């Protein structure tokens, strides 16, 4: 995709401004949503040097108060004037709001780490998973994009295998939790499960096209001319950019499943040279951001319940691809609100401090 048109940084420019006391003034755009709230938790957990902190949202949330680390914060209107004296913006809003407001934040002098899809494929916007291509933050021009949640969760266990075998192709099926559709998706599934438990009729679904409880929906995003959904194409298009593999081929099927939190993925990987199961396990055991949970004899493998509210991506069921010798099949699961969104964004922000 062509450049977005941001002003080029000077080579000597700091990655992000820091105040005299070492702190960073931060604004969270979309602060009242699921990801925005998780960003607040991650900033506290990781002891990020937060100076002033602004919570920005739509008019319906303005005036609400949030308690954070002994501070009482009042939600402010998301508008260009709100970025005055802000060093870092963490974006947790939709594409339209991101496109409208984040360039304004850059003009005001802030660096933006954005969780929306708006800027991910622009040539002058880094798309970063710190464990894979953290060095790409060094060429930002004001905006750094956070990848799609399923992309992050799928690439983390594949990356260490790529380093020993040279990744060529992925065949992936995702099993994506209701909370991937935000607070409305989470609330709708919880309501449907409660109604079923009480023997009540389920209301007409709103967050999803169909009832999700006791069901699964093999569509996330709209269909393209090739028959694949927009969500399915993200793993290939974003994966090529993150891994610097412009020829990476990905066949992906994305499915919404009746799980509250944490996405799971079945992945089969093909390499330039054969990768053995022993090599794969050894690489995964030492990989950053990955926890190997792979003990078939004791029925230990990744599951959404265990990965929820965790930052590591759990990986297991590591085995030879018997349809293509030298390939590897695996199953992984990760919390898409944390590592798939908020934690990854805060990790990017940490790279900007170095």
Image: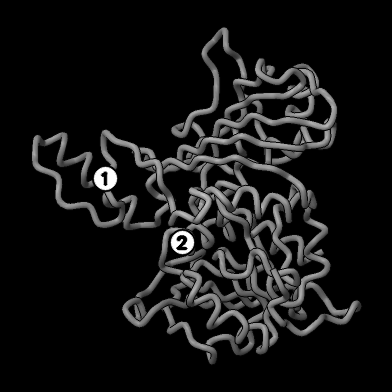
The residue to which callout 1 is attached is 190
* In contact (CB < 8 Å): disc 2 and disc 1: no
Q: Secondary structure at mark 2?
A: helix
**Height in image: 56 above or below 185?**
below
**Height in image: 145 above or below 112?**
above
Q: Earlier in the sequence, mark 2 or mark 1?
A: 2
Of marks 2 and 1, the one in the foreground? 1
The location of residue 245, given as percent across then percent down, is 78, 49
Residue at the spot x=72%, y=61% of the render?
350
- Direction bottom: furthest residue: 81
Q: Secondary structure at mark 1?
A: helix
The location of residue 34, given as percent across then percent down, is 43, 59
The location of residue 159, given as percent across then percent down, is 75, 39
Left or right of residue 98: residue 222: left
The location of residue 291, given as percent across then percent down, is 65, 31
Left or right of residue 74: residue 22: right
Residue at the spot x=83%, y=36% of the render?
166
Residue at the spot x=60%, y=54% of the render?
343
Residue at the spot x=67%, y=88% of the render?
107
Label 2, label 1: how many angstroms apart (C-alpha)?
19 Å
Q: Residues within 10 Å of mark 1 (few under 14, many from 20)?
A: some
What is the quadrant of the C terminus in the image?
bottom right
Q: Quadrant of residue 218?
A: top left
Q: Nearer the viewer, residue 252 or 23?
A: 252
How many numbered marks appear? 2
Marker disc for residue 3:
none
What is the quadrant of the N terminus in the image?
bottom right
Marker disc for residue 37:
2
């Amino acid at each position: 995709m062509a450049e977005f048109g941001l002003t080029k940084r000077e080579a000597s420019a700091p990655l992000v401004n820091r105040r005299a006391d070492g702190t960073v003034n931060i604004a969270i755009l979309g602060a009242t949503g699921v990801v925005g709230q998780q960003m607040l938790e991650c900033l506290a957990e990781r002891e990020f040097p937060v100076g002033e902190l602004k919570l920005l949202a739509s008019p319906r949330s303005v005036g609400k108060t949030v308690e954070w680390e002994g501070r009482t914060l009042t939600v402010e209107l998301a508008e260009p004037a709100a970025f005055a004296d802000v060093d870092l913006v963490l974006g947790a809003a939709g594409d339209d709001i991101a496109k409208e407001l984040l360039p304004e934040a850059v003009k005001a002098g802030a660096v933006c780490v954005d969780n929306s899809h708006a800027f991910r494929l622009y040539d002058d916007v880094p798309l970063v998973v710190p464990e894979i291509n953290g060095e790409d933050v060094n060429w930002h021009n004001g905006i750094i994009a956070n990848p799609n949640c399923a992309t992050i969760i799928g690439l983390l266990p594949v990356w260490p295998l790529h380093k020993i075998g040279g990744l060529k192709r992925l065949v992936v099926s995702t099993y994506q939790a209701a909370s991937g559709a935000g607070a409305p998706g989470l609330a709708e599934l919880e309501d449907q499960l409660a109604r079923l438990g009480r023997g009540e009729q389920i209301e007409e679904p709103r967050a999803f096209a169909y009832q999700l409880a006791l069901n699964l929906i093999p569509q996330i995003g709209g269909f393209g001319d090739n028959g694949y959904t927009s969500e399915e194409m993200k793993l290939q298009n974003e994966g090529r950019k993150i891994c610097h593999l412009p020829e990476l081929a990905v066949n992906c099927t994305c499915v919404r499943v009746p799980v509250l939190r944490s996405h799971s993925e079945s992945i089969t990987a093909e390499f330039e040279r054969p990768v053995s199961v022993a090599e794969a396990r050894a690489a995964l055991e030492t990989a950053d951001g990955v926890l190997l949970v792979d003990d078939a004899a004791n029925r230990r493998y990744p599951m959404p319940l265990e990965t929820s509210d965790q930052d590591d991506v759990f990986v297991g069921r590591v085995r030879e691809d018997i349809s293509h010798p030298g390939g590897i099949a695996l199953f992984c699961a990760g919390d898409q609100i944390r590592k798939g969104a908020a934690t990854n964004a805060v990790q990017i922000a940490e790279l900007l401090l170095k």
